[in-house]
Amino acid sequence: MNKNKSAKPFVKWAGGKYKLANDLKKLIHKKFDITKNTYFEPMVGSGGFYFNLSPNNAYLSDINQNLIATYNTIKTDVKALIKKLEKHQKNHNKDYFYEMRDKYNEIKDVKSVDVASLFIYLNRTCFNGLYRENSNGKFNVPIGSYKNPTICDRQNLLEVNKLLQNVNIECHGYEKIIKHVKKGDFIYIDPPYIPIDPTSFTKYSKDDFGLEDHNNLSDFCDQLDKLGAYYMLSNSDTELTEKIYFKINEKNGQFLIFEDEHDNRFSDKFLVSRTIASKSENREKAKEVVITNYKT
């Protein structure tokens, strides 16, 4: 395990797992060797579980190109990033926020330090730290009501920089990790959740993650299982989640009998507070399910 345990997520994220990470850690397969095998997180978001675990070997990826660009900037050019964030910290006000939001949406060079600094700045100052894009792919979250938001956490960024030095960080869909996964590796999958109700937040980019995507992800889990890798997947605790990820037969409502030894799935459930809400006291408790291909 990496000795650097002080690094923590540098952005807020819908459904972030940092506070739940200690519970999730207890469910990791006991045969997963964190010092030798590789930890994959193909929908990394804020990386809450990754930062808690701090594995020696890791492969982090996401489809959000600006998020991944920010990870890579912290890894390769953290001092320049800190300098720009200190400027944002000094200049922050309502007018400045919307000026910077417009600038962020106009930048073409995704890999620039400007993108990373604006990504963090907007995340730390926008409403509830939401990442949301309109149909044109433009970030459109309004300013939040913070008195003195921490925009530049210099010490944490330096710690994150150290932790990321031996990490592969890539921008692509979850499917592409399959060519890198080996027997004994561990994959934590945290997709946009199946909604508990139609108004639930499950979208964070211009591309929806719908029911077909969840079905495809379920099939992808079978591929991981056949490789001899261990996976853990989080989702909402709904009947539809069971139907998709446990392959319940619609006709009789029973769990299907899997044809080979690799197709076993198990679940644990948690009662958690939603991480995105206007006030902490209003955060409702909700059940989440953790699905694995091994008994915990």
Image (cartoon, rainbow, N blue to C red):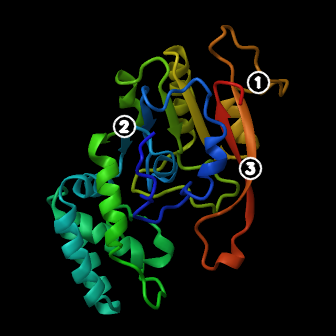
Q: Secondary structure at mark 3?
A: strand
Label 3–label 1 contact, CB within 8 A: no
Residue name at image x 63 percent, y 79 percent: 279
Q: Count residues near mark 3 (Cα–Cα under 10 Å), then give few for <14, some for 14-19, many for 20+.
A: some
Relative to the observer, which residue lies in front, 52 or 125? 52
Q: Count residues near mark 1 (Cα–Cα under 10 Å), then give few for <14, some for 14-19, many for 20+.
A: few
Relative to the observer, which residue lies in front, 52 or 224? 52
Relative to 95, say whether 67 is above or below.
above
Kindly report the distance in space between the C-alpha atoms of the residues bearing marks 2 and 1: 35 Å
Quarter of the picture containing the C terminus is top right
Q: Amino acid at mark 2?
A: Tyr
Relative to 286, say whether 257 is above or below.
above
- Marks 3 and 1: which is nearer the front? 3
As drawn, the label of residue 183 is none
Q: Amino acid at mark 1?
A: Asn
Quickly name the residue at label 3: 270
Specify the quadrant of the image occupied by residue 152: bottom left
Specify the quadrant of the image occupied by residue 244: top right
Quickly name the residue at label 1: 249
Residue name at image x 19 percent, y 69 percent: 106
Q: Amino acid at mark 3?
A: Phe
Q: Secondary structure at mark 2?
A: strand
Residue name at image x 64 percent, y 53 percent: 195
Q: Secondary structure at mark 1?
A: loop
Query: Along the horizontal axis of the image, is 111 left or right of 295?
Result: left
Quickly name the residue at label 2: 59
